[in-house]
Amino acid sequence: MMDEREEDDEEEAWLQLRPVEPLPSQCCGSGCSPCVFDLYDRDLARWEAARASKDRSLLRGKESQSCPSKLSPETFLAFRISAMEKLTEDTYRVQFVLPGNSQLGLWPGQHLILRGIVDGLEIQRAYTPISPANAEGYFEVLIKCYPTGLMSRCVESWRAGVTAFWRGPFGGFLYKPNQHGELLMLAAGTGLAPMVPILHSITDNADDETFVTLVGCFKTFEGIYLKPFLEEQARFWNIRTFFVLSQESSPEQLPWSYREKTRFGRLAQDLVEELVGSCRRKPFALVCGSAEFTKDMASCLLRAGLAEDSYFLF
C-alpha cells in the first residue's frame, strides 16, 4: 500500500493531467460544434474516468489525436502562409499552403477556426475560406483587422512563411447544385466571404442553373472587396450583382459599369422587398455580416414575405 506522501504525489500527478478550462477569449462565438468548451467537457469526463479507475491509458484517446493527417474540428493543424495581399487599409487576403495537391475538404460556405496567441492569451476567431472548394494545394481567407482587435494584432504580424493554426470545418449551410431556384445573397463587408466559394461552385459547374442575386454592402466604392472576381462573376448569364454604399451619395463618381447597380445609404426594407420581388425564381436568401446587419436582414426578409425556412444566417 502507498504511504501518505506517495498518495499526495499520485494526487498531484493526476491534477497535473487535468484538462485546463478554456478562457472566454478562446471561444470564437460563432456557435461551432464542437466548441472549445465541448472539447473541454469531453476531455474532463475522460480524465475523471481515468482518475477514478487509476488507469492513465484511458487518456490516450486524447493523445492519439495530436498528429492528425487531415483537417479536424477538434484539433488545430498548422498551415504555412504563402502570400499576403492587402486589399484595403484594414483587410487582407491570405493564402495558405496545403500539402501536395490536396484539397481543404470544406463545403462551399463552411468556415474554419483560427487560433492566435497575443500577450500570452489564446484567442480563437471564425473565418470562411474564399478559395474554390475544390482548390488544390492552397486555400485563401479574407481577414479584416480592427484597431483594438486581439486577433488583428496577430494577423498584422504575419508574413509569408509564418505558420498559423486552424481547425474545422464548421457551418450548417451545405450548398448543393440546383437545390434552390435562386439565391439572394445579402452580404456586408467581409460577410462577402461565404458567398464567394458558393459563387465559384455555381459558375464552375455547367450543370448548375441556380440564379444568383448578390447584394454587397460597403462603406465606399474603394472599399468593395474582390472587384475583379465580382465583375467576372456578373458576366455569367445567371449572376446579378448589386452594391449598397453607406458613405457615398454621388453616382457620377462611380465607373459607368457600376452606376445602374449601385444604391446609396443602407440596405433597408424597401430595397429588400424590391430585390425579393425582382428575383427570377423563388429565392432562398443567404445573409452574412455583423450581428446587427444579420438581425435587420432577417426581419426585412420576413416582412418581404419569406418564411423562416427560406433564408440562412451565417
Image: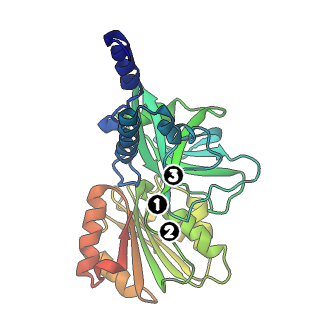
Q: Which residue corresponds to the image point at 30% horizontal and 38% vertical from the top-left?
A: 24
Q: Position of residue 296 (x, y in %)?
A: 25, 66
Above or below residue 124? Residue 226 is below
The image quadrant that residue 314 belongs to is bottom left
Residue of label 1: 192
Q: Secondary structure at mark 3?
A: strand
Q: Give the amino acid type for the residue marked by disc 1 in the picture.
A: Leu
Residue of label 3: 168
Residue of label 2: 258
Above or below residue 51? Residue 11 is above
**Distance CA(mark 1)–CA(mark 3):** 20 Å
Q: Position of residue 104 (x, y in %)?
A: 63, 55
Q: Nearer the viewer, residue 301 or 11?
A: 11
The image quadrant that residue 197 belongs to is bottom right
**Distance CA(mark 1)–CA(mark 2):** 18 Å
Q: Between tags 3 and 2, which lies in front? A: 3
Q: Position of residue 199 (x, y in %)?
A: 56, 70
Q: Give the amino acid type for the residue marked by disc 3 in the picture.
A: Gly
Indicate left or right for 172 with 104 as reference. Answer: left
Indicate left or right for 165 with 248 as reference. Answer: right
Q: Nearer the viewer, residue 288 or 232?
A: 288
Numbered badge on residue 310: none
